[in-house]
Image: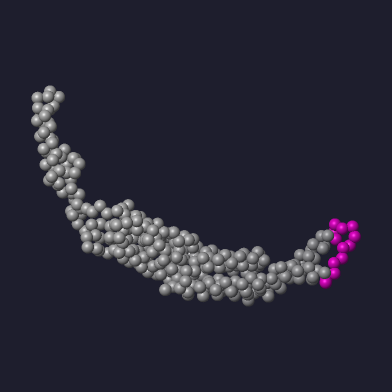
Amino acid sequence: MGLNSMTAYGFGETTGTEFQYSCEVKSLNSRFLEVNVRMPRQYLAMEADIIKHAKAKLHRGKCDIFIDIQHESSAKNLPGIDQEALRHYADLCNKIATELKGDPAFDSNRKPGVLDYLRMDGVLLVDHKKERGNELADIHKEFVFKALDSAIDALIEMRAKEGKALAESMTQQVNELEADRAIIHEKRDNIISGLHQNYVKRLKHVIELVNKNAEGEVEFSDERILAEVGILCDKADIDEELVRMKTHCDEFLVNLKTNDPIGRKLDFLCQEMHREVNTMSNKLLQTEVSQYTLNMKQNVERLRQQVQNIE
């Protein structure tokens, strides 16, 4: 096993003594597991067991299950003629004709035709058992579940195939994230040094403006300036974000190799990655590494979209 996609399709079928059973299972991405069953109304007594059976095999996704049950020969289900009922109605018609003979309201030329007899209750003999829902479920359940298992197994196989492709793509995304993170880590000392120089220049410029507008000379010692610059540089430090980002990337790659349902966990890791990248981007605004934080944001967003389809 491995990573599973939630979007997939599976088909299964089996044959009983007189019936053909087929099952289709279609799944789409969803935060939770939702199973819906569509089948002929007379077999709905099986619905709860079908849902329970599907939930034992699937963990996440919106799953639609379609069950179809067909008699192998449709001719076997065609109605016949009940000879006794037909003779009974024919005798009644003859008696009525005799009783009303000579009555001006009676049309002696209007005799019942074939279609008239077919419409009479009981003439058509439907040759099928009148089992109730529970009895029908007992008769067909074994074969329905064989078709269901085949369809779910095919669905799981397709999920695994799609999941493998997703895992390869996401591994590449995470590796690119780590590459950009490593570049920023390598440049962080130069970044802080550049920020330090910029802050000193900006503070001295502000002091000059203050002195021009002040009545008296306002003095700021170099120590005070350096202290203020130090505070600003501490606020721009990204060491913690870099460390956490690496931890998240490593954990993401480890989870991609597990056999457990990990969609929600990967979604959480994407949220954490997004938070770290956002913080670094805000701290390092308009620096030489802005392009790398932008790349990281884009890769995290791609990961988030792909994770939505992971079981």
Give the magenta-colored segment's residue range. 211-223
Magenta-drawn stretch contains 251: no
Image quadrant containing the N terminus? bottom left
In percent of width and height, residue 28 lies at 42, 60
Q: Nearer the viewer, residue 84 or 278?
A: 84
Main SS class of the magenta portion in the image: loop
Q: Residue at x 38, y 64 (%)?
A: 53
Quarter of the image where one finds residue 163: bottom left
When asked about the image quadrant of residue 68, the answer is bottom left
Q: Is residue 215 left or right of residue 67?
A: right
Relative to 291, residue 48 above or below: above
Which residue is situated farthest in the top direction here?
104
Judge from the rendering whether residue 221 lies leftward or rightward of residue 165; answer left or right. right
| x, y percent for residue 48 | 39, 58
Relative to 39, say whether 251 is above or below. Answer: below
Could you tell me which residue is drawn at 87 percent across and 58 percent down? Answer: 214
Q: How many marks?
A: 0
Extreme residue in the right direction:
216
Of residues 171 and 49, the one nearer the viewer is: 49
Residue at coordinates 32% horizontally, 64% vertically from top-left?
A: 145
| Left or right: 263, with 80 as reference point | right
Q: Nearer the viewer, residue 142 or 138?
A: 138
Res 52 seen here: yes
Q: Position of residue 279 (x, y in %)?
A: 64, 65
